[in-house]
Amino acid sequence: MRITLIEDDPSVAQPMVEGLTRHGFDVDWVATGRSGIEAARSADVVLLDLGLPDIDGLTVCAEIRNRSEVPIIIVSARGQESDRVNGLELGADDYVVKPFSMRELAARIRANVRRRPAALATIDFAGITINRDLRTATYDEGELGLTRKEFDLLAILAEQPGRVVPRSEFYARVWDPVWVGSGKSLDVHVTTLRKKLPSTVRIEAIRGVGYHMVSTSEVA
């Protein structure tokens, strides 16, 4: 498994490279945000420090997320709740506060990879075409104009149409396994997503459980 480590401090980076290598990972270390954005293209997981010399780490996080679905784990001494929330909202999958144990970091890396199952690049359902690589959702050759989270929610629902996706799974895959924001965030995003979908599909709430998506032709 290839790890891209974005960390400007050699005294921090070198022990991380050595420790992760002992745990069986291949580590590419870069010291700037710009080089990290490029290196992330070939990574299986990105470890990201926030205090970088050229670009703030949160900006790097958002840029990588705009380009890729690679798991991003922020590893930072900045442990305030506002930093954690900002990082997670900008696309990070996990947040580890320094100092940390290498064993825990390795476990978090593997957990985040497991949480991102291999998925079809393109999904077609009820006339909607979802392209995960391009992060586009189209209907009748027109873009649906989804936000990042709306796209992720739609892609999860379309993986197995009709399957009820638990709320906890949405939060784990789209937000964070330990979500610290509003418990209504999922419902708000589903509401806005519904407004952008064609009449060929319907997202239904299963009270106390989660949501599923069905073709309206199947329920007519």
Image (tube, helix red, strand yellow):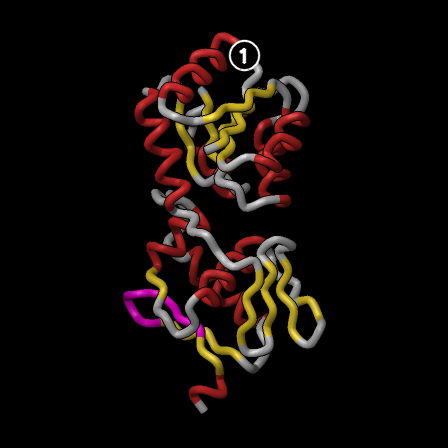
- List x then y, in percent, for residue 178: 34, 42
Quadrant showing the N terminus: top left
Residue lying at 62% horizontally and 37% vertically, measured from the top left: 41
Taking the magenta stretch, the answer to whether it contains residue 207 is yes
- Specify the quadrant of the image occupied by residue 168: bottom left
Q: Residue at x 43, y 27 (%)?
A: 25
- Vertical placement of 9 versus 48: above or below? above
In the rendered view, would you say 7 is above or below 116?
A: above
**In the depicted view, which residue is nearer to us: 40 or 150?**
40
Q: Residue furthest bottom?
A: 220
Horizontal side of 75 relative to 67 (left or right) equals left
Above or below, comparing residue 21 to residue 131 in the picture: above
- Where is the C terminus found, in terms of image quarters? bottom left
Closer-to-camera residue (186/68): 68
Left or right: residue 20 compared with residue 60: left
Q: Residue furthest top?
A: 11
Look at mark 1 in the image and give the residue it sits on: 9
Instruction: Please say whether residue 97 is one of the residues in the magenta stretch.
Output: no
Image spot of residue 76 (x, y percent)? 46, 23
Label 1 secondary element:
loop
- The kind of residue on which mark 1 rests is Asp
| x and y, in percent, of residue 145 in the image | 66, 63
Look at the magenta stretch and give its main secondary structure: strand
Task: Kindly identify the residue that appears in the image at 40 percent across and 24 percent down.
Answer: 97
Q: Could you say where residue 104 lies in the image, as x and y percent from the top left?
A: 31, 27
Question: Which residue corresponds to the image point at 57% horizontal and 82% vertical from the top-left?
Answer: 199
Structural crowding at the residue carrying mark 1, measured as other residues with C-alpha within 10 Å and reported as few (<14), some (14–19) or many (≥20): few
Q: Total label count?
A: 1
The residue lying furthest to the left in this view is 208
* Magenta region, residue range: 206-213
